[in-house]
Amino acid sequence: MAQHQEKARIIRFEQLSPETVRLTLAAPQIAADARPGHFVMIRAGLGKDPLLRRPFSIHQAISNGQIQIYFRVVGRGTELLAKTKVGETLDVFGPLGRGYRIEAERPAYLVGGGLGIAPLLFLAQRICQTGRDLSRDQILLGGRSRDDVAPLVPDFQQFGLPLQVVTDDGSYGRPGLVTDLLDGERIDPSGVVYACGPEPMLAQVARFCADRGVACQVSIESVMACGMGACLGCNVDASGGGYLHVCIDGPVFNAEDLAWNM
């Protein structure tokens, strides 16, 4: 897979909630090669503060040469990105990593929690573009509260797939956890669960799928310094012993390949 470094102009800035922002960037080379689950590294500032690029999953890649990232303001890098304006340019490198492997003929269950919802929009789009029967697919989304989930629901609804939403506090959708939704579903054993979210949620999804013999792909969130396997700072325990690296072996893994230490 080719990687590209582009000076990406900000086409659109959306403050979707008090803490979350979506940026649309003109990055034609990255958009052309991006697949669901890939990520990009973005330099958030012009100088050395912050020194390192920040990783962001690709929220959407659009055929007109644009990509989107969706993030919550949690630190210096995202704080700077949240202050950018339309017309400014960002130094973007990608696409990077191994993405989701779409099993075109098998029922798909997309399970997202918190910011893990973001890359699933791109995945839902590509699954719908396979042209197969989508009647057995499901999208299950969860978050802490309305602000975590509600801004993206209309984007998922455009695909016409069955969609269920829960929030921890019950402020949007039903109260509960997204893993409760999954547990209540009649999952076809021939299907594939595609998940992204906090590690405790992914561990529970992985156990659920292992118990039922359902294939499961999980996207791991990790702090990264380089995104290319040079610093080896994003290692995770492998089920067979040793380590895997989120940036080059993932961020999407078969759930059975990881050791879930929780």
Image (cartoon, grey):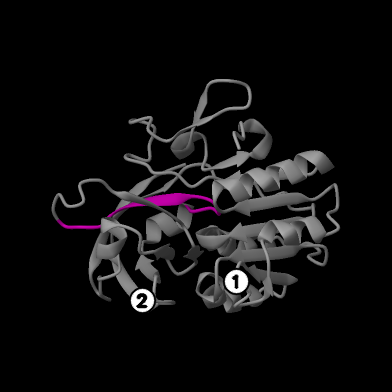
Quadrant in the picture for residue 209: top right
Density class for disc 1 (Cα within 10 Å; few <14, some 14-19, many ≥20) is some
Q: What residue type is labelled 1?
A: Asp
Which of the two labelled residues, at mark 2 and mark 1, occupies the earlier sequence position?
2
Main SS of the magenta part reads: loop
Q: How many marks?
A: 2
- Which residue is the extreme one toward the front? 169
Residue drawn where x is 39% and y is 76% of the image: 18
Residue 213, can we see it?
Answer: no
Mark drawn on residue 169: 1
Q: Viewer-nearest of labels 2 and 1?
A: 1
Q: Which of 143 and 244 is in front in this view?
A: 143
Q: Above or below — where is 126 with respect to 238? A: below
Q: Where in the figure is residue 145, as x and y percent of width and height? A: 55, 71
Please tell me whether mark 1 sits on a helix, a strand or a loop.
loop
Q: Above or below — where is 259 with respect to 50? A: above
Please tell me whether mark 2 sits on a helix, a strand or a loop.
strand
Residue drawn where x is 24% and y is 63% of the image: 80
Q: Which of 9 and 257 is in front in this view?
A: 257
Write down the residue under mark 2: 12
Mark drawn on residue 148: none
Magenta residue span = 34-46
Q: Is residue 94 magenta?
A: no
Q: In this view, does 7 lie to the left or right of 135?
A: left
Q: Distance between the residues labelled 2 and 1?
A: 31 Å
Density class for disc 2 (Cα within 10 Å; few <14, some 14-19, many ≥20) is some
Q: In this view, does 202 lie to the left or right of 116?
A: right
